[in-house]
Amino acid sequence: MTLEQTLPICVAGTWRLGGGERYATCYPATGEPVAWLNAASLEDVELAVQGAHQAFLNSGWAQRKPHERAAVLYRIAEAIRQRSEELAQLQRQDNGKPINETRALVASAAGTFQFFAAACETLEETITPSRGDFVSMSVYEPMGVVAAITPWNSPIASEAQKVAPALAAGNAVVIKPAEITPLLALQLARICEDAGLPKGLVSVLPGKGSLLGDALTRHPLVKRVSFTGGTRTGKHIAHIAADKMMPVSLELGGKSPTIVLDDADLDHAVAGVLYGIFSSSGEACIAGSRLFVARSLYEPFMQHLVAAAAQLRLGDPADEGTQMGPLISAAHRESVERYVALGLAEGGRLRLGGERPSGGLFDQGYFYPPTILEGLDNHQQVCQEEIFGPVLVAMPFDSEAELVEQANDSLYALAAGIWSRDYKRAWALGRKLQAGTVWINTYKQFSISTPFGGWRDSGLGREKGRLGILQYMEQKSLYWGMSQQPLAWAGVEARP
Ligand code: NAD
């Protein structure tokens, strides 16, 4: 297929041109088109959901034994591994992340399918303690059609985290990837089909979220939405879900604190803080964007941090050594720039960065350097709002009580990091922080077997973990009467 040709999309088991507008996805490092496709239309949403519903009812997928469904998921994991380099290169073009990061995301997607295959074939239904002449059981049923709505920052990994458990549970899935990064979701649908998944069980609808994601969420046949994205969109989806009495999981934004105590190992803390905020160019929900450093350590720590941040390799995502690629789009870079200007207007000082780099590729793509601000208070706007870029705000703290209050003073509560040599102290602090994930002497490390999600405006529900599959199932209690006698209640003695 040449660049000018229009990519088909996957609607209810058929690959065909979307019914919406033609548009190009662009490589953020150069701004050049990667592929052309037609967005899905509202008619495509209807076809995809109806097709998914029919596939759920008629393909026999939900009735297959768990180990049979698992066998298909293992094949999907294997196919992702076999095509890993091609997928990683495509993802680099799709969203501009450095190749080493996209390789890790593809590997994580394969691991997710493998993990949920195992979760599927080992899921237990329980016989619960009986309180009468009956056997009581708790069992799980698939839900039907699940919508997976994903953002642009980690394609394929985000989709896998929703599609793998939803399919493992016996459901059909309609994926709505971010408009600007649809290519990996389309590839995933091909892989699922080639691995023997019945047609129609996975559809992919690229295009505008306000049109397609909204219609998908409202559709009466959609029984659950698993959403990752911004908090404003998540709340909109939650409102629709409330009207439908539909369960949702919402993985939303963050403004995570990273805390360096006065007894921290400096080298470890500097490396961890840098990775926490600047990897993925800060386009990560869990980015450690608020840095709190014990005042006694503040200046030496900052000197070390700024010197190390200045050495980070910003550049061509195709180069093996690149640590930071471009931001996703020109509009997003402008939004990051507005936040830096706001921080300065609020009284902040730049310790590093704050200006677009220039020359060569920097003049074509949407690059922005590691940027560190200081001189701000936690209540100020740049400390409270998610910037979603490579911008760190550093603040000294005096007492641990003041630190806890400030670290928790955020609408968001997704993640936090603590750097300390004293494990008892770090443990006590970790228990006081309000966040879905707390990393101690590490940051941004993940295991598919560990639940992930946020508190407050960072979200509802959890993904991952062996029991993550249950999010995509309805629980049912079954009672089996075992008594030889009729129920001892009215009317039994009156029988002639
Ligand atoms: P976004 O909310 O704009 O879009 C996310 C998805 O929702 C896209 O597919 C979009 O098309 C769709 N969408 C948009 N409007 C919709 C509507 N009205 N109804 C239904 N769907 C709609 O977010 P984004 O800009 O793509 O991603 C960045 C955000 O995602 C950041 O806030 C980031 O923190 C968050 N995020 C969270 C996690 C997490 O796990 N907590 C992970 C990654 C990203």
Image (spheres, rainbow, N blue to C red):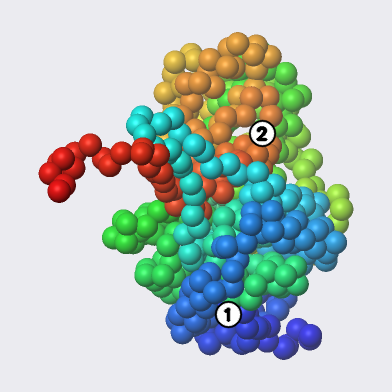
Q: Is residue 338 left or right of residue 317?
A: left
Seen at 52% across and 47% down, the residue is 470
Q: Is residue 187 above or below residue 158?
A: below
Q: Is residue 224 above or below residue 403?
A: below
Quadrant holding the N terminus: bottom right
Q: Is residue 266 above or below residue 468?
A: above
Seen at 56% across and 45% down, the residue is 468
Q: Quadrant of residue 23?
A: bottom right
As helix, strand or loop, the secondary structure at mark 1 comes to: strand
On the image, numbered disc 2 is attached to which residue? 443
Instruction: Of the two numbered discs 1 and 2 on the same chain, state the one appearing first in sequence.
Output: 1
| 429, 360: nearer the viewer | 429
Q: Amino acid at mark 1?
A: Val
Q: Quadrant of residue 78?
A: bottom right
| 211, 487: nearer the viewer | 487
Q: Residues within 10 Å of mark 2 (few under 14, many from 20)?
A: many
Residue 262 image point, x, y percent: 62, 14
Residue 102 image point, x, y percent: 75, 55
Residue 492 image point, x, y percent: 18, 42
As helix, strand or loop, the secondary structure at mark 2 comes to: loop
| 495, 418: nearer the viewer | 495
Q: Amino acid at mark 2?
A: Tyr
Seen at 65% across and 44% down, the residue is 122
Residue 118 image point, x, y percent: 69, 47
On the image, numbered disc 1 is attached to which residue? 11
Evaluate whether residue 485 shows in this view: yes
